[in-house]
Image (cartoon, helix red, strand yellow):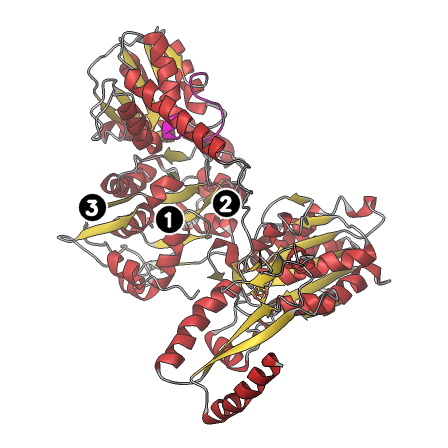
Amino acid sequence: MEISFAREVGMLRRGKGEVFEGEGILAITKGLLEAGVAYVGGYQGAPVSHLLDVMVQAKPYLAELGVHVVACANEASAAAMLGASIHYPLRGAVTWKSIVGTNVAADALSNLSSPGVTGGVLIVVGEDYGEGASVIQERTLAYALKSSLLFLDPRPELAHMVRFVEEAFTLSEAANLPAILQLRIRACHVRGRFDCRDNVAPPFSARHPIEEPAPFDYARLAHPPVTFLQEKRKVDERLPAARQRIVERKLNETFAGKRDDLGIVVLGGLYNTLVRALAHLGLADAFGASTLPILALNVVHPLVPDEIVGFCAGKRAVLVVEEGTPEFVEQAMLAILRRANAPTHLEGKGPLPAAGEYTVEVLARGLLDFLGRHAPELPLDTGRTWLDGVAKRRDEVAKALATPLPARPPQFCIGCPERPVFAAMKLARETIGPVHVAADIGCHSFATFEPFHQGHSILGYGMSLASRAGVSPAMRKRAMAIMGDGGFWHNGVVTGVQSALFNGDDAVLVIMKNGYTSATGTQEILSTPNESAKVAADDKGRSTVEANRTIENTLEGLGVRWMRTVPSYHVDEMRATLEEAFTTDFAGLKVIIAEGECQLERQRRVKPWRAKLEREGKRSVRVKYGVDEDTCSGDHSCIRLSGCPTLSVKDSGDPLKVDPVATVLDGCVGCGLCGENAHAATLCPSFYRAEVVQNPGWGERLVDALRRPVMRWLQAA
Ligand code: SF4
Ligand code: SF4
């Protein structure tokens, strides 16, 4: 990864007497070190990638403390790593994006939770739910409920969040249960400050190793018959121990209100949004002083029945603020109140929607509905006026736009090496016809948008080849799976390749070998080229990723007999290879490796390198493509084939040419796709390739001086 987190690593070093300022997710990272974590692992994914990225770059400092950091192959391997805390008093933390990551980790989580833990275990999940989310809209809480994991959802305020890292570890140790700490997107990015504490070196580590392994203890295995006893212990001992500690440490917070006949129970992570909504209704100030009492559940599982009953006592009605479906907390509270014969009326879903993020506006509408019925005497006109104003502004904007704005789906980066592969597929379809395409998680899933529209299904990260296994036998034509190198190592090599080979499947697999898990932030993987390979390749203007052949060697070792490696930008060669894969008599698995480094990562490296050359007065060359507008016919087939955001249109300036002509904007990185497409699809010859030379040599200056008058003469003629 070419991004430096040196500033963040510096923040991690701060100690007592110093102040931390920054984002929530980095505060959690610091909190782990203050809590004496012994090992950290995880798999990257928004919104928690930052935790692992920073920890990986902080390895030298963490080694001083004795903290061990692992960039895991996937979430399952991260969860399995937590097994270290079953026997040993080691505090461990892992992180991933949820719900998807928790799905992958589920097996290990069950097997961890059943025997329970000795050292505290913390799973920091980035709950990717609501507006801006990139995954299926489900909730991690479901896993906590089924596996008896502790589930914390702290109020998004930095000092509070950091306190809850320590609290989560001690709660986990008190109950012998692993703890999940949920952070929504907004909580990860909330900014603030807190007073640092000194980082704590773990008692056991590479610096202070454990002398002897723990004695054999069958009760620590998730294996029958002890699993039956473990289930009982969860119910009889561990969850009660957790409830006791939640009460003792006052982990859930009650904020008193001016009136006591109504109340709100909110999951801690939604507290800030709730207070903002109340403020818009004139029922709270900016600091949270509220008309209505609020119970903020910083620990959502297990609930403490006495706390719930105590809060509801004397209240006519209580609103539960809990995003998503099912309404686990609302249902649990209904059962708790019914068992206690408490008369409080409970509402949640109804005033509040069953699906989607609870934004300030959504909460304000739900509160107006709830309070309009239960406290009609409250002056709520401020809130109604505000909501009407929001709706009015939205209408005005809609009316101001004579035609709606075009949708702006996410796109491949400029010069992305994956775009040419889909252009080649488009061209290959002219020969082989449409085929079933099993898509995958990764940047290549952008090909499901315009102008490619390729991909019938997405079943999980690295699951494309496996997901076409049921389709292939039912199809006259071969089915194709697309996978990134990130997905290949995450899951695809086992669930897809191994299974297809074992079952003798006749299928086509395209692997995008761009050298990184690009979609998650260009983290490095087993097939990332090393630094010297990158420097050598850049110097020669070659693809860096061809230097690492781990994927090819793995596939050969597994027994793949039909494999082609094609440079991504060679559109014509890629088209011919795809056609061959779909028409060859070879009936086994056919793998095409599309080789081209992630352009985003490449530009992060090349731009500073080029700038340095220029600063030092040395020669540097930047390639740029352009369109000769006199030649452009204006049919825009180049745009439909490429989709590059820098390939745009402009007025021709020629009254006889009414259609706008194609043009290349300044962002062009000179990837070469425009020229390749023009050649492969026999487009009009309007593209030209230019080299912008900075600090040219005397020979180049001389040639330039001779060329200029000739060109001027030709243009005049
Ligand atoms: S991050 Fe890399 S692989 Fe992803 S779209 Fe951008 S250039 Fe392509
Ligand atoms: S050469 Fe074409 S496809 Fe490549 S970056 Fe430039 S405009 Fe985009």
Residue depicted at 66% across the width and 58% down the height: 657
Instruction: Find disc 3 in the rendering and name its residue.
Output: 194
Q: Amino acid at mark 3?
A: Phe
- Image coordinates of residue 307 in percent, x first then y, are 29, 20
Is the CB atom of the residue marked by disc 1 within 8 angstroms of ligand 1's nearest atom?
no
Residue 479, disc: none
Q: Please, what secondary structure does the residue beneath circle 2 have?
A: helix
Label 3 – label 1 distance at C-alpha? 21 Å
Label 2 – label 1 distance at C-alpha? 15 Å
Does residue 310 appear to the left or right of 620 in the view shown?
Answer: left
Instruction: Find disc 1 in the rendering and name its residue.
Output: 93
- Image coordinates of residue 680 in percent, x first then y, are 73, 67
Q: Nearer the viewer, residue 680 or 707?
A: 707
Q: Which residues are magenta?
A: 350-361
Q: Amino acid at mark 2?
A: Gly
Task: Check if mark 2's residue and mark 1's residue have beta carbons within 8 Å.
Answer: no
Q: Please, what secondary structure does the residue beneath circle 3 have?
A: strand
Occupied quadrant, residue 238: top left
Residue 101, disc: 2
Q: From what the image shows, is residue 578 above or below residue 281?
A: below
Residue depicted at 39% across the width and 57% down the height: 53
- Image coordinates of residue 83 in percent, x first then y, are 44, 48
Task: Check if mark 2's residue and mark 3's residue have beta carbons within 8 Å.
Answer: no
Is residue 358 found inside the magenta-colored segment of the image? yes
Res 239 seen here: yes
Q: Nearer the viewer, residue 275 or 685?
A: 685
Question: Which sits earlier in the primary sequence, circle 2 or circle 1?
Answer: 1
Q: Please, what secondary structure does the residue beneath circle 1 have?
A: strand
